Amino acid sequence: MRNVMEIEHLSTYFYTREGAVKAVNDISFRIREGETVCIVGESGSGKSVTALSVMGLIEEPAGKIVEGQIHFDGKQLLNLSKQELRTIRGNDIAMIFQEPMSSLNPVIPIGKQIMEPLKTHQGLNKKEAKRRAIELIELVGISRPEQIAESYPHQLSGGMLQRVMIAMAISCEPKLLIADEPTTALDVTIQAQILDMLDRIKQKANMSMLLITHDLGVVAEIADYVIVMYSGKIVEEGEVVELFDNPKHPYTQGLLRSKPIIGDRQDELYSIPGQVPNPLDLKESCYFHDRCEHCLPICKTKLPQLKGMEGRQRVACWLYEEGTHHD
Amino acid sequence: MASISGGAVELKRSQAVPVRSSLWRQAMLRLRKNKLAMSGLGFIIFMFLICFIGPLFSPYADGKIDTANMYSAPSWEHWLGTDLLGRDMMTRLLQAGRISLTVGFASMCISVLIGSILGAIAGYYRGIVDQVIMRVADLLLTIPSLPILFILGALLSEWKVPTEYRMYIVMLMLSFVGWPGLARLVRSQMLSVREREFMQAATVLGLDDRRKLFHHMLPNIIPLLIVVATLNIGGSILYESVLSFFGLGVMPPTPTWGNMIDSANNLIDFEQHPWLWIPPGAAIFTTVIAINIFGDGLRDVLDPKQKK
């Protein structure tokens, strides 16, 4: 299968008064055509920053992509001019945000907002764009599309607004759809509907999707390939079945254990002890070592690199390096 | 298409979506309940109508000098009396109103146009563009408006600008002192709007700067702009009156409310012929009050954050 996007050695730092925060620290991965890649990790693990870096939304001088390459469709995104980037955004790569309520302009009717990318990228005139906007609203499962097109964001519910956001994102039939926690702000009943719809639209249009989430339930439901991030690093990645059946990294194991199991009454939900390390002083060690149950002496002095396992699975952990012994 | 919608459609059907109750319509409904603001608006409309239509029915609209009728007191023939050249004061008052109101509105429009475009550009692009625009605006704001206007007015007289053009130049002068305040306001609003999340969403959609600025950001500040623009008209009318009163604005024989008061600029006229100065004074007073009351009402409706 062809790769839609290849990210190589991407590092994005933010500069604060106390020093540089390595929000994304030398990560590489690829997204294949028609594939759904999920990035999982807790808050501050760098998953959103990865998405923002891809979209070119890191605002200098506060943050900067210090290293790396992002190949998309034969182009190197980080080298493009503002103008060239603009023709890709919304057209070839689209993005959905976490908060649909604040991602839509409160003073402009919804139909008009959907028409904007159509007019910009596809050169449709007002009438064509309007017709297409109404089709799109219908496509994302909203009834009475003509009326919805005339209404303002505050008149719709969060779930409907997220549908509208999706309609906008897919309006120009992008090759890659980036969804940054698209269901986090919605209530649980709506979450499943939205995910379901995203998945169906994705398959129909043969889009690839980069889904960012902290919800392992979402991952299990929709992902083909999973990337687990911790402190700006990829600690483990692999196809969803491999990774869920046989998690290698102690962090992934911990994450999967801390997921509640329906129908199984537990006195206390498992949680990984300790906290994410302070991003300002990351030592030359495995960033997870002080929370890890299997910590070895080498974990405290050297950062493990990603290493290939069976299939597409890769893990960055000393436990699986030759020469270090298993516990 | 139907397969994708699935069960979601049924779920949404129960949620009532108000049929096209736009933000504007709601604002207008609220405005209609504000009696004071509505009476202000009513008076402004009334003033416009009689100033622009009234003189059409006056037999004295040509402004002919009538030496037999100098300084005559109000009567059935001359409702507000006549001036020192025997011209009908009522007709002149209304003709003056045309000029004063036109100057007020036109200069507001020009300053809103300049102020909002420059302010929007400054707030959106930041950096050097912002610095240049805002420092020029600051410079103009450090000098009180009246002295600038006096100097400009004096220059007009010095350069002997023909009377018929003076009205237009006065409009430009008033916009010249009016835009910096507006630009500041628009810029500050733009700074806050540009950080809102939907602007990032607009960037992600690949919209160009022009679309982002004028289709996404400006609509967010239009309510505020309308309020400020309305209040600005009152100010412009006052400034025009002051300038004309001092003989630096629109010159006689073209009447404006300001230069009509100026014609009673001596003790004898002031004491003996009050019809020369009371009507134009009252016209300025009531019009500006009406505009300000209406502007305050608009502010309450459109800009709820400013409400006490």
Image (cartoon, rainbow, N blue to C red):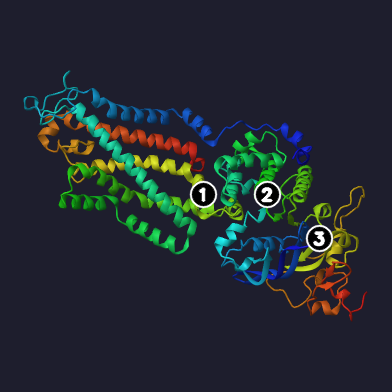
Residue A156 picture quarter = top right
Q: Chain of mark 2?
A: A
Question: Is the residue B276 above or below the residue B186 in the image?
Answer: above
Residue linked to disc 1: B217
Is A201 positioned to the left or the right of B180 in the image? right
Disc ID at residue A170: 2
Q: Secondary structure at mark 2?
A: helix
Residue type beneath disc 1 = Met
Is B127 positioned to the left or the right of A171 in the image? left
Residue type beneath disc 2 = Ile
Question: Is the residue A190 above or below the residue B119 in the image?
Answer: above
Mark 1, other Cα within 10 Å: few <14 / some 14–19 / many ≥20: many
Residue linked to disc 3: A225
Disc ID at residue A152: none
Mark with earlier residue (2, 3) = 2
In this view, the residue in front, B75 or A182, is A182
